[in-house]
Image (cartoon, rainbow, N blue to C red):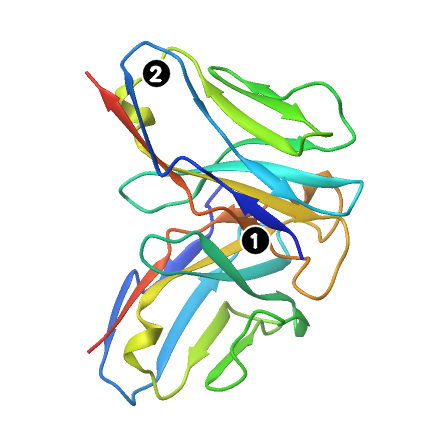
């Protein structure tokens, strides 16, 4: 079974600065998907960015980018020019290409609480 | 284009009662997933359904929990004889397909279940 580890329970950053949230995962599969979701105080889960494992190019969405290191099984999220609205819980998630036995669902880490200091 | 809809947003039940949580997927999506989030935890996969079919229920507790996604209407997660340990946020997600890059799951706002 796959596992996802987020080793930073909480991170704090000054507004307008850059912050990196770490995520590592364990899998024996060679191809899979990785995601970052944001959960603000409203508790709605919002997709931030996604990455296919076979793509070597790191995904980017505006101020959000990832550093995907497949050999190291690392998938960190970088937020540039942090804004107050970025304050939320951030969850890293893994999805297998296979089906059944729980593989259809996302496997989530425990999350990192991001605080933005004004 | 409406997103994933869940209702109720908050549900309070006494021990032993039944809880019914509803989820309407995004327009054009035929795959539904249910997750449970305990306090201070990430989401845990429970069940994956397509219309009229349960595809993967490996994350569902063996007793008291059931799910369905009928041909017409929303998906329902049903918890019978609730206990305090069932108190959690329950999220529904939907996707367009079951495989491929378009399989990104989009989440509803969740239902917070409180068992007294």
Badge nearest the viewer, 2 or 1: 2
Is residue B26 left or right of B81 when viewed as pictured?
right
* Residue B103 % position (x, y): 67, 45
Q: CA distance from mark 2 to mark 1?
A: 29 Å
**SS category of the residue bearing label 1:** strand
Is residue A66 left or right of A18 when viewed as pictured?
right
Name the residue located 39 percent from the left edge and 53 percent from the top edge: B41
Whether labels 2 and 1 share one chain: no
Q: Residues within 10 Å of mark 2 (few under 14, many from 20)?
A: many
Q: Chain of mark 2?
A: A
Name the residue located 65 percent from the left edge and 63 percent from the top edge: A102
**SS category of the residue bearing label 2:** loop
Asked whether the viewer can see residue B28, the reply is no
Q: Chain of mark 1?
A: B
Quadrant of the snapshot with the C terminus of chain B: bottom left
Is residue A87 left or right of A53 when viewed as pictured?
left
Name the residue located 76 percent from the left edge and 26 percent from the top edge: A55
Q: Which residue is under mark 2? A: A82
Q: Which residue is under mark 1? A: B94
Q: Residues within 10 Å of mark 1 (few under 14, many from 20)?
A: many
The answer to which of A100 and B55 lies nearer the viewer is A100
- Answer with the quarter of the image where residue B32 lies: bottom right
Asked whether the viewer can see residue B8, the reply is yes
């Amino acid at each position: 079974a796959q596992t996802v580890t987020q080793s930073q329970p909480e991170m704090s950053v000054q507004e307008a600065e850059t912050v990196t949230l770490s995520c590592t995962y364990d899998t024996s599969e060679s191809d899979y998907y990785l995601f970052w979701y944001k959960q603000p105080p409203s508790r709605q889960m919002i997709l931030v960015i996604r990455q296919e494992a076979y793509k070597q190019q790191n995904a980017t969405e505006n101020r959000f980018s990832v550093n995907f290191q497949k050999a190291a099984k690392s998938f960190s999220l970088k937020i540039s020019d942090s804004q107050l609205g970025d304050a939320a819980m951030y969850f890293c998630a893994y999805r297998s290409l296979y089906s059944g036995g729980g593989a259809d669902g996302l496997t989530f880490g425990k999350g990192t609480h991001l605080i933005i200091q004004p | 284009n409406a997103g994933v809809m869940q209702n109720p947003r908050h549900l309070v039940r006494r021990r032993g009662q039944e809880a019914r949580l509803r989820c309407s997927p995004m327009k054009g999506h035929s795959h539904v997933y249910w997750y449970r989030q305990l306090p201070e935890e990430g989401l845990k996969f429970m069940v994956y359904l397509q219309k009229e079919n349960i595809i993967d229920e490996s994350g569902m507790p063996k007793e008291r929990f059931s799910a369905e996604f009928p041909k017409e209407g929303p998906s329902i997660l049903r918890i019978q004889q609730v206990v305090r340990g069932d108190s959690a946020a329950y999220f529904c997600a939907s996707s367009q397909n079951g495989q491929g890059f378009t399989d990104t799951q989009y989440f509803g706002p969740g239902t917070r279940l409180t068992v007294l």
